[in-house]
Image (cartoon, rainbow, N blue to C red):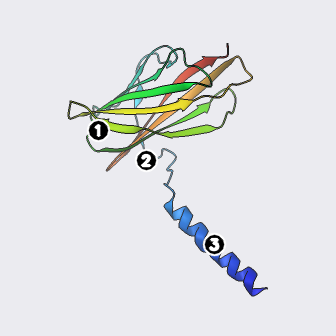
Amino acid sequence: MNLKLLAAAMVAFVVGIGVFSLLPLDSGGADASMLIVQGECDLSHSSCLAQDQSGHEVKFSLSPRPVPLLKAVAVDATVMGMDDLRVAQISVEGINMYMGIQIIPLTITSSDSASEQKLTGTLQLPVCTSRTMEWRVTLVLQTNTKEYQTAYPFTTVTP
């Protein structure tokens, strides 16, 4: 084997291992605590509440409503009971048709209340060939000791 080719392969392998080690591990939700959506939930029409039995709670909303396509959509959430929240992000994916997956980091800001934090971000949805598109927003929250997840549904209609 050519020494230059072997050296290039070794460098690529070492760089690949280095990049892989920097990527966040996705446990696939196996170790995540699930926050359960309470009652009927459709972010197209209202905010939604999710909580667990330990007193962790997230009120989540998208605006404007109805959720538009190809325009900025504001993401707002209020998190209660997670004092050591350090990372928050959402992923948005189509349910009835694959539209790719958007991963959007959210900005975390403290509120007046010590146990309340605000999350904000912006997303933009593509137009689909289907008139009605069903979506799911999965919120992932990481504290210093645990990961929490919840999923919220919503629908868009192409005008």
User: In the structure shown, which secondary structural element does the residue marked by tag 2 occupy?
Assistant: loop
CB contact under 8 Å: marks 3 and 1: no
72 to the left or right of 52: right
Residue 74 image point, x, y percent = 47, 26
User: In the structure shown, which secondary structural element does the residue marked by tag 1 occupy?
Assistant: loop
Of labels 1 and 2, earlier in sequence is 2
Q: Label 1 crowding class (10 Å Cα cut-off): few <14, some 14-19, many 20+?
A: many
Identify the residue position indicated by label 3 in the image.
13
For the N terminus, give its image quadrant. bottom right
Kind of residue sitting beneath label 3: Phe
Q: Label 2 crowding class (10 Å Cα cut-off): few <14, some 14-19, many 20+?
A: few
Kind of residue sitting beneath label 1: Met
Instruction: Select label 1 or label 2 by which is in front.
Output: 1
For the C terminus, give its image quadrant. top right
Kind of residue sitting beneath label 2: Asp
Identify the residue position indicated by label 1 in the image.
82
Instruction: Select label 3 or label 1 by which is in front.
Output: 3
Residue 91 image point, x, y percent = 53, 37
In this rendering, is residue 61 above or below 88? above
Q: Residue 31 carries which label?
A: 2
121 to the left or right of 111: right
Residue 131 image point, x, y percent = 71, 16
Q: Label 3 crowding class (10 Å Cα cut-off): few <14, some 14-19, many 20+?
A: few
